[in-house]
Amino acid sequence: MKETSPLNLYKQLPQTNCKKCGEQTCMAYAAGLIARTRKVEECTPLVEEKKYAKKLEALKSIIAPELKMIYVGVGDKQVKIGGEDVMFRHQMTFFNKPPFAYDVTDAMEEAKLVERVKMISTWKKFYIGKWERVEMIAVRSVTDDPAKFAACIKKVMETSDYPLILCSFNPAVLKAGLEVAAKAKPLIYAANKDNWKEVAQLAFDYKVPVTLSVPFDLDALKSMAVTFASMGLTDLVLDPGTAPNGKKLQQTLQNFINLRRAAVEEAQRDIAYPVIALPINAWLTTEDPVRAAYWESVLTAAFTIRGGALMVKHSLGAHSMMPDMHLRFNIYTDPRKPVQVKPGIYKVGNPGVESPVFVTTNFALTYYTVESDIASNGIDAYIISIGTDGIGVQASVAGGQLNPTKIKDAFGETDFKFEGQKYPAIVLPGMAAKFSGELEELFGGKVKIMVGPEDSGRIVGWMKDFWPPK
């Protein structure tokens, strides 16, 4: 969707301000469509009344993402692949982070297969207020045996409800897998120049999305995409080839850029599909598992930045997974809206009447850093998160989003009572030290204002020197 003006979307709406969508005005609803916080279906008059039929079709066309969005899986675990509108994050934002799919094979012993599937589907890491998880499982056929592939998929589905990628170039193997998993709407990988007719028929018969694999030949890849589209198959994922090193790696990255540019800047609808990357190919470069895992992480980072919409990976080692989870989180966080926590008072540990109250802002990175530094040192405390529109301490002090009046009012909006505390005091972050005098006046001298360290990592030392207050 290249449209950024709510006014142009407003022209396609009923313009009655009926409020049925949940917004007060049609203009506000139009702005929500651009931000993707609202859906077309929420405007019930537009959808239900025949007189708006042309406007409805026009609106759907306008707001459709430049890069087609593909759905894999069913239920609450379903993933969205693609659906982006810009080349670079700072132009607006990215909406759908690339799912990470970790592999299992049909040659694994059942016990090890189940163990790995459980590791994949239960892995999680709390990072800046959100749980980061793996999203998919890629089932690879290495035996080329349809029966073994089907049995493997059946066991995977019994163990996990994660969306699947069925990986084989043998149509007979893919068909055996689809007979087990078609209702779960897996992505099949892949159609190539040798098997495309049979795989296209499978995608049509079982109504599942399909990957088109034409390594290092974008013209041939586009030709195959056009062929599949002419057959009514438009739930496509493109595989332009993933070289793990050397000059081919440079070509891989350039192909990813060229495909994204063709979709979002040049409006080449014939090839405007999400792209799959295979960082797992790092394991082809070395027999050293540590080196392979690190290089897989490097490749994942590169492809995440360069427009990869789906990653197939192998290593479940923390040294490989964590950097890519963090990078993906940061790249796919809306730069227009800082990550925030809800303003209010929070408990760390089991605070009581002798516990300190630390002040910080509601910028998530700041809040969770302070919380972690307090909790990891076994300190029982309260933290009050002040609403600063998600701006950190130093910037909000300088910009006025954090000020003595706001801090005083924030306590008034909670049920926290200083009268019940043995040491009625609050601890300001060191960068807000200048507020201490005015805050004491606002609290009428009934609350002691203390100045903590500028770095929350020094709170444990500060506690030894200054708490309880004398």
Image (tube, grey):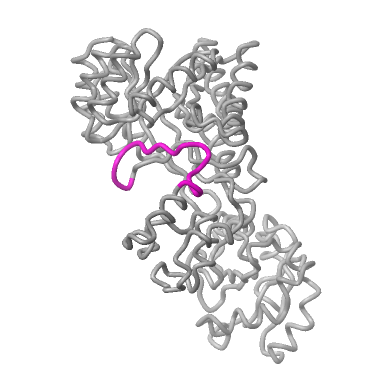
In the rendered structure, the answer to whether residue 236 lies left or right of residue 92 reads: left
Q: Where's residue 292, x and y in %?
A: 53, 18
Q: Is residue 435 left or right of residue 323?
A: right
Name of the residue lying farthest toward the top: 194
Residue 249 sits above or below residue 61 on the image: above
Q: Nearer the viewer, residue 181 or 237?
A: 237
The front one of 434 and 302 is 302
Residue 408 found in image quarter = bottom right
**Image quadrant of residue 175?**
top left
Q: For the magenta stretch, what is the residue range?
A: 61-76
* Quarter of the picture holding the C terminus: bottom right
x, y percent for residue 264: 58, 36
Across and down, in percent, residue 150 comes to: 21, 21
**Residue at the spot x=37%, y=18% of the render?**
190
Q: Residue 350: x and y, percent? A: 47, 68
Is residue 415 placed above or below 200 in the rendered structure? below
Q: Is 73 covered by the magenta stretch? A: yes
Q: Give whichever of 444, 246 is nearer the camera.
A: 246
Say above or below: 65 vs 385: above
- The relative height of residue 452 versus residue 59 in the rendered view (above or below) is below
Question: Is 53 covered by the magenta stretch?
Answer: no
At x 61%, y 31%, the residue is: 261
Residue in the picture at 19% in, 27% down: 180
- Left or right: 409 with respect to 453? left
Please name whichever residue, 2 or 455, is drawn nearer the observer in this view of the structure: 2
Q: For the image shown, how many numbered marks are present on the structure?
A: 0
